[in-house]
């Protein structure tokens, strides 16, 4: 299980050179049917073969419908497919199973699905529950930006950066400045984004 989680981390971090060696190591071990299926689902998702990954994950959930790890992976597949409705449904289930441990993901999904009022409400709850995470304020900012309230959007992006400077926070702020035609400041903020994530 540790190696499968490490594989997921490599996939998430785009450590493509490390993946084949770890997959070889995993295939040399005697994996259970569940572990082998999970490996195949991860590999399918990593190559954007989402329908295969989704089919495998749904099969695994049929045997264990409250498996938090599998539910989370399935929600990530739906997000990658931009199927925000299905992703939000899973995150709602995960929040029930984990006492709101997935509020950030649910707020993100609702905002991406243009359900701004509901998303913003959940993002505010997430900001309270997870005060060290910049993500709730980023998605609050995106919600404001989508509705054309750039002043509130930029304030939210600045709040996220105050919690923790991230490439996403800087990029969202710079995009808002760009849209408002404040090009000089946008360029400076984009440079900060690039410094964090060349």
Image (cartoon, rainbow, N blue to C red):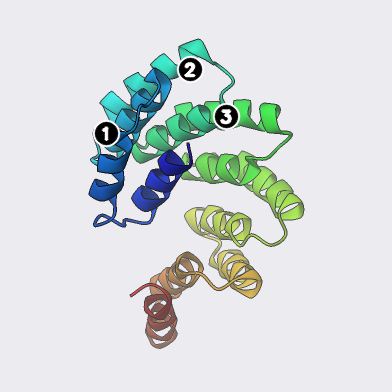
Badge 1 local density, few (<14 within 10 Å), some, or many (20+)? some
Looking at marks 3 and 2 on the same chain, the residue that comes earlier in the sequence is marked by: 2
Please name the residue that numbered disc 1 is placed on: 44
Q: Return the disc, 1 or 2, that comes first in the chain's sequence.
A: 1
Q: Is residue 77 above or below residue 60?
A: below
Q: Nearer the viewer, residue 197 or 3?
A: 3
Left or right, residue 37 beside residue 168: left
- In the image: residue 173, left or right of residue 15: right
In space, the residues marked 1 and 2 are separated at their CA atoms by: 17 Å
Say which residue label 3 marks.
68
Tell me the CA gap for discs 3 and 2: 10 Å
Crowding at dot 3, Cα within 10 Å, few <14 / some 14-19 / many 20+, comes out as: some
In the picture, which quadrant includes the C terminus?
A: bottom left
Task: Say which residue label 2 marks.
Answer: 61
Question: Would residue 43 appear left or right of 134 to someone viewing this image?
Answer: left
The residue drawn where x is 37% and y is 26% is 31
Crowd band around label 2 with a 10 angstrom C-alpha radius: few (<14), some (14–19), many (20+): some
103 shown above or below 145: above
Residue 48 rendering spot, x and y as whole percentages: 25, 39
Q: Are marks 1 and 2 in contact (CB under 8 Å)?
A: no
Question: Which is more toward the observer, 168 or 141?
Answer: 168
What is the quadrant of residue 66 in the picture? Answer: top right
Secondary element type, mark 3: helix
Q: Position of residue 179 (x, y in %)?
A: 40, 70
Instruction: Report x, y in % for residue 190.
Output: 39, 78
């Amino acid at each position: 299980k540790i190696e499968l989680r490490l594989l997921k981390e490599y996939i998430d971090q785009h450590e493509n050179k490390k993946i084949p060696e770890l997959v070889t190591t995993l295939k040399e071990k005697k994996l259970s049917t569940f572990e082998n299926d999970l490996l195949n689902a991860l590999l399918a998702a990593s190559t954007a073969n989402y329908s295969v990954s989704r089919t495998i994950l749904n099969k695994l959930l049929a045997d264990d419908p409250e498996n938090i790890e599998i539910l989370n992976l399935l929600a990530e597949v739906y997000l990658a497919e931009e199927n925000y409705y299905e992703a939000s449904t899973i995150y709602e289930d995960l929040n029930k199973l984990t006492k709101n441990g997935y509020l950030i993901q649910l707020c993100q999904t609702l905002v991406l699905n243009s359900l701004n009022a509901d998303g913003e409400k959940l993002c505010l709850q997430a900001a309270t529950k997870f005060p060290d995470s910049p993500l709730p304020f980023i998605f609050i900012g995106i919600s404001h930006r989508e509705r054309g309230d750039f002043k509130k959007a930029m304030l939210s992006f600045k709040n996220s950066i105050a919690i923790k400077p991230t490439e996403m926070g800087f990029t969202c702020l710079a995009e808002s400045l760009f849209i408002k035609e404040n090009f000089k400041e946008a360029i400076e903020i984009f440079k900060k984004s690039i410094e964090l994530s060349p």
